[in-house]
Image (tube, rainbow, N blue to C red):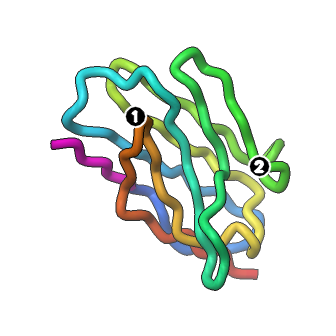
Amino acid sequence: QVQVVESGGGLVQAGGSLRLSCVVHGIIRSTGSMGWYRQAPGNQRELVARITASGDTTYIDSVKGRFTISRDNAKNTVDLQMNSLKSEDTGLYYCYCAPDYWGQGTQVTVSS
């Protein structure tokens, strides 16, 4: 059974940093994309950052230059380093692993 476990969310002041971590249990090695999505109250879930097994990355425009996604294929982990956080980054962050595995979400709250 595949299990996706996130950690690292919390409350931080604007301008601060957080690091989200995710580990995928129950698969031998992830060969597809992994990434982070977020959902703010009243909004749809949106892609924040994605990384392929070969290391190609995609970011939503609003986080470019502030967030960095990384992964360890051997350990089935994907991390999201978030710097210069803004209040609009507040939301529930979900880890994703292809083909369709999702975590329960970890809350990120940025106070202004």
In the picture, the disc for residue 17 is: none
Residue 67, placed above or below residue 31:
below
Residue 57, visible in the rendered structure: yes
In magenta stretch: residue 5: yes
Q: Is residue 94 above or below residue 98?
A: below
Where does residue 25 sit, x and y in percent of width and height?
23, 38
Residue labelled with disc 2: 60
| Residue 12 visible in this rendered orientation of the protein | no
Q: Amino acid at mark 1?
A: Thr
Question: Main SS of the magenta segment?
Answer: strand
Vertical placement of residue 49 versus 107, above or below: above
Image quarter for residue 70? top right
The residue range painted magenta reads: 1-6
For the C terminus, which image quadrant?
bottom right
Q: Position of residue 9 (x, y in %)?
A: 48, 63
- Kindly identify the residue that appears in the image at 24 percent across and 29 percent down: 27
User: What is the crowding at mark 2: few (fewer than 14 residues within 10 Å), some, or many (at least 20)?
Assistant: few
* Residue 45 left/right relative to 77: right
Question: Quick check: 107 left or right of 62?
Answer: left
Query: Which comes sooner in the sequence, label 1 or label 2?
Result: 2
Residue pointed to by mark 1: 77
